[in-house]
Image: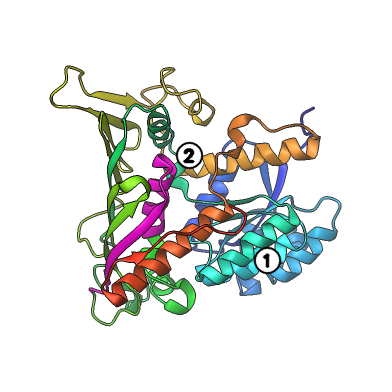
Amino acid sequence: MALDRKIRYGMVGGGPGAFIGDIHRSAAALDGEMALVAGAFSSDPEKSRRQGRALHLNPDRVYDTYEQMAAREADRPDGIDVVSIVTPNVLHHDVACAFIEKGIHVVCDKPMTTTRADAEVLCRRVEEHDVIFALTHNYAGYPLVKQARALVDQGRLGALRKVVVEYPQGWLNRRLEAEGDKQAAWRTDPETAGAGALADIGTHAEHLVRYVTGLRLERLCADVGTVVEGRAVDDDASILARFEGGVRGLLHCSQVSTGEENNLRLRVYGTEAGLDWRQEDPHRLRLLTDLHGDRPQQVYTHGRASLADSVQPFLRTPQGHPEGFIEAFANIYRPVARTLAARKAGDDPPDWADDYPTVQDGARGVHFVETALESSRRQAWVDASYTPPGA
């Protein structure tokens, strides 16, 4: 039995001029399964109301605070099913708790929290209240990333040996935070962001490795630093890693790599083959074959029926029509919407609808940040193993 309405969602954050709020709204709307009906878009009530008017929302459902929103929406017979949290990092924990306590499901931007203690609180509360919690590590939403995961699961790479993941950006190669740039200001403020490049993009790199390979970190040795003079958070990190099974790894993230745009790249090498994927060319995945063998290299492209069955539900356009950043975000929202609709209709969700990053993924990401910072302070290898509550 299908649900006879769209999934209703609200948003906290994403007010006037907020880049990521527009991305989330576009992604949630893409499949026509969700409708934005409420919001507390800014800590400034007037800005929140202005955004509500721009989005043509009922003024009664545009709130001055997220606490007010959680309480009133929980009491409405037509209240929201899920909230999308797109605030600065420091607010994620408190906002999520307010809605979880009301039994409202959560989609949260990353990093999930600024401390591991807060992340573990969320893990426990999600379990206690039996709510869905999805984290928008959107790069896991790209179909060819899902194909990479399928190739690893199928054993096409053989036994894994080495992982290399890099995420260089150049937009913070000077102190934009001192020049009035709003995005730079909060992302480089330890009070609102926690860590810097490690939290902002390093968590994406760490999650991408874990999503594709299934490997858990065991130990790491990090060199984390601040390159731009006067900046209050890290803006560059190089990390040696050891994963389970003796797999070696190298993770590099930087926001001071002049000229780089968003060059996230993952390479995984096994005994039989390797793979190579780049976010700036996301609809191609290279399967690298042994130089001493007779098998040619393969290039997987978007939209083909030859992609794994687990990839097919996340394809939207035919081959030759590449999908991009917003579609990858939408591939987090789509399984959440399908799971919620099935729950409310009393049905079982489709098998693929559990393919989204969870609250435990969020806790692992925060643990990774704290462990890397500890390693860098000590200038030593440290234990990076971790099992979050509920995992």
Decide if residue 385 is in sight here: yes
Start-end of magenta stretch: 202-227
Helix, strand or loop at mark 2:
helix
Check if residue 222 falls in the magenta segment: yes
Where in the figure is residue 231, as x and y percent of width and height? 30, 79
Please, is residue 295 above or below residue 243 in the view? above
Q: Find the residue positioned furthest to the front.
A: 245
Query: Which residue is tagged 2?
Result: 327
Specify the amino acid type for callout 2. Glu
Graded by Cα atoms within 10 Å as few (under 14), some (14 to 19) or many (20 or more), the crowding at tag 1 reads many
Please, is residue 128 above or below residue 326 in the view? below
Q: Can you tell which of label 1 and label 2 is closer to the viewer?
A: 1
Count of numbered labels shown in the rendering: 2
Query: Which residue is tagged 1?
Result: 97
Check if residue 307 falls in the magenta segment: no
Q: How is the image coloured?
A: rainbow
- Quarter of the image for residue 376 reads bottom left
- Quarter of the image for residue 228 reads bottom left
Helix, strand or loop at mark 1:
helix
Where in the figure is residue 304, as x and y percent of width and height? 41, 20
Residue found at x 43% / y 59%: 385
Graded by Cα atoms within 10 Å as few (under 14), some (14 to 19) or many (20 or more), the crowding at tag 2 reads many
Where in the figure is residue 232, as x and y percent of width and height? 34, 80
Where in the figure is residue 337, as x and y percent of width and height? 66, 40
Residue found at x 50% / y 70%: 114
Specify the amino acid type for callout 1. Cys
> Separation of disc 1 and disc 2 at Cα?
28 Å
